[in-house]
Amino acid sequence: MNNESALIEDQDFLENLMRTAPAQFDEVLQNKEAYETQIIYTQINRDSNNVPSFKSFYYNFDRDRYFYPASTVKMPAAFLALEKLNELGINGLNKYTSMLTDSAYSGQSTVYEDTTAASGLPSVAHYARKIFLVSDNDAFNRLYEFLGQATINDNLHQKGYVNARITHRLSIPLSEEENRHTNPVTFKENDSVVYQQPLIYNTGPLPEKRQILKGVGYLKGERIINEPMDFGQKNHIPLDEMQMMLRAVIFPESVPQKQRFNLSNDDYEFLYRYMSQLPAETTYPDYDTANYYDTYSKFLMYGSEKTSIPQHIRIFNKIGLAYGYLIDNAYIVDLENKVEFMLSAVIHTNANKIYNDGKYEYDEVGLPFMKNLGEIVYQYELKRQKKQLPDLSKFMVGYDKPVGGQGETHVDLFQNYKHYHIPALGKRRIKRRDIEPFITGLEEIPLFEVSKVGTSVEGREINLVKAGDGEIKVLLWSQMHGDESTATRSLFEIFRFLSSSDLMDPVRKKLLQKLTLYFIPMLNPDGAEKYNRRNAWSFDLNRDALRLQSPESEILKKARDQYDPDFGFNLHDQSIYYNVHRTGKPASISFLAPAYNYEKEVNDTRRNAMKVIVSMNKVLQEYIPGQVGKYDDSFEPRAFGDNIQKWGTSTILIESGGYPDDPEKTNLVKLNFVAMLTALIDIAEGDYENEVEEDYYDIPDNDRKLFDLLIRNVGMEKDGHSYTSDIGIFLHEIAADGSEELYYRSAVADMGDLSTYYGYKEIDAEGMTLSTDDETTSFPALGKEAYFLLKKDNKNILAISNGQIINLE
């Protein structure tokens, strides 16, 4: 493959790219009409905010040239089935609810159990799994029956996929009338019926039929019929619509609203998992990997090769193979090299032009072509210059079985996180009683030593957890401020990681052999009880390192002196309104190697902390690029972090801030988990020593210039004069009296020129005017709740209701 660097990305680009590898592509290029080859290759370029833009290249594409889509029709069926569940909106009905299929018309069959499922019962989720993992035909047929023939086609057409036609089941010969009838379906939770759907009959016209004659004959029973086969009543999806359906799920924000599928965040995560998961990584069904190998459903890049796919290569796709046609519709990512692209291709291999005889050149022509096409485009993408490398963490999903051993450890930790995540600690406002069962559980695991190291002002127990017996000692303490729980939740997930056994066992072994770990998961349980920063005496524990008047402060100081740790992790939360200096990105995680004197001198103790921070920052940039800041390093002589640094323990402050659309900080719990374990591994291996101190100073400082909502350039009137102003709005979290229920109350926090500020959400209201209930002024009142209208040409465009945006168009 040569001369790629001289290629011009024009309308002939794909053909010219293939011509650089004549041995692989000449046969197909010279016979493109016979092979009916069509290709769409879409480049993806990201801006500084990771927003993608798309540029597509076509080879021999013709929307009107029919090809049989085979199993690729299963992809939109899975999307539509998930959408239907959401739109039914029935309590207790979801993709995991048991789905029992009955029969009520000729050609129909029943399904009351599925021994390949964990529950032994079928469900929409399990059918979708089997569709993407091994292209199961019966799974598609059951979703076709749940949806109904009319629903499938009407919904696709309404979304703009106007040429799509899915009118029959797969692998079973049914008449047109039988395919119009779809089975009764019952969804059950235990023995209770959640939803019943009777037999559905499509009385409407089918999508437009036309005669599509192909070949010179076809096998019918034992006899060759010597006339072309008519595909006019068979399924059909043009290649561009097929790729756009995939894009609507991979990048929903990039397509118009009408083209999207109505999916929840959990649906998207589910689809990303099973579209890219391999049979060997699957628990249910438990596939025989001799028959269902890694590349079983991955034509592009691998063809017919029965080989392992590197863990950093993930292919989100759906294949099809029938009547000599091979199709693959894929989004391909290389997580290690920051490569991503979309590639959709079809090739037809039927040299004798007889259908149904089983004589197709899949292995000789079709699959090698798919392998070579995927490989040449991938190699081109590896070399293609990009202004911004993509943040692909959205696609680093967890799989049924933990992965590990092939890539960087932090990638394994990130992808396997779901196996260690603790949903019961899913909210920020956790109390001592919430962690009590997990503390008790640790006492039963020989790996851990759990001790009571004292009690709080109000008598709540404070525990220390010990693990490992290595020479290097590390102390980690969390929630010395009662309303800062993010890292506490991460620590319990670290406990679960350390006590698990899977492909990451070599990492655990190293940690526990080289380190002795001491954890104080919740230092201030009284503050946690009231979700308050201070303890029961209203003392700030982080200003009590010298006088040690609070019992909680004494406990931390005693632990530091008794164990004399080499490293310490001081775990906190910071305001969600901190941003990374001179950017609109939140400081989702901030670090600090605290100063130990006013001069901010650097000795070996502080330098080691800086180097560990440099290592953690490099890891986090893979997942939250541009969202890591450096906390203010002014010396505070009363603070624990500053003093523990002075007392000889290399101390790392971790502050968890804000993350868009994540009020419970779920993503930050995960990032703390990854960052802390990565740091501990670097400490165990001594790799942090290779980092450069100067890189610590390159981490940008924190700033505090974020609003929940920032409205820019809005017109306002007061006293007969017109003004242009920006408006910054905060959403304050309020706990209802005597309840754990929360609600938000907005407040207009600032107005005027806020051009140096940013918002989690922003509105450019240029050309709009603001209208309030006060007829004498359009100025909102500072400190008051945010309720007003934004108008353009005297038409209401947006309403701001308690700080929330409502589109009125």
Image: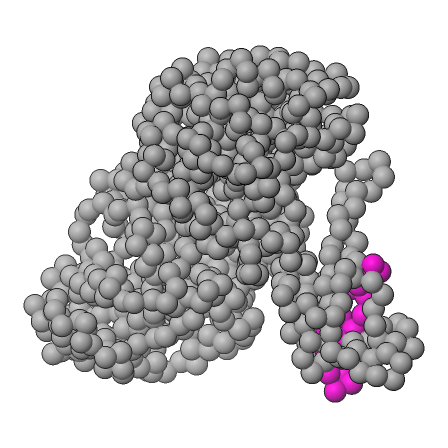
Image coordinates of residue 737 in percent, x first then y, are: 85, 39
Image coordinates of residue 540 in percent, x first then y, are: 72, 31
Image coordinates of residue 380 in percent, x first then y, are: 23, 66
Rendered view: 163 above or below 525:
below
Front residue of 574 and 694: 694
Q: Residue at x 51, y 61 (%)?
A: 80
Asked if residue 785 is among those painted magenta in the image, a careful observer would answer yes
Predominant secondary structure in magenta? strand
Q: Quadrant of residue 500?
A: top left
* Quadrant of the snapshot with the C terminus: bottom right
Does the image show residue 523?
yes
Asked if residue 193 is among those painted magenta in the image, a careful observer would answer no
Front residue of 531 and 586: 586
Does the image show residue 188?
no
Image coordinates of residue 300 in percent, x first then y, are: 25, 60
* Quadrant of the snapshot with the N terminus: bottom left
Q: Residue at x 58, y 31 (%)?
A: 641
Q: Residue at x 42, y 77 (%)?
A: 163
Q: Is residue 542 left or right of residue 184?
A: right
Please provide the residue range marked out in magenta. Answer: 783-801
Q: Is residue 47 left or right of residue 377?
A: right
Q: Quadrant of residue 292?
A: top left
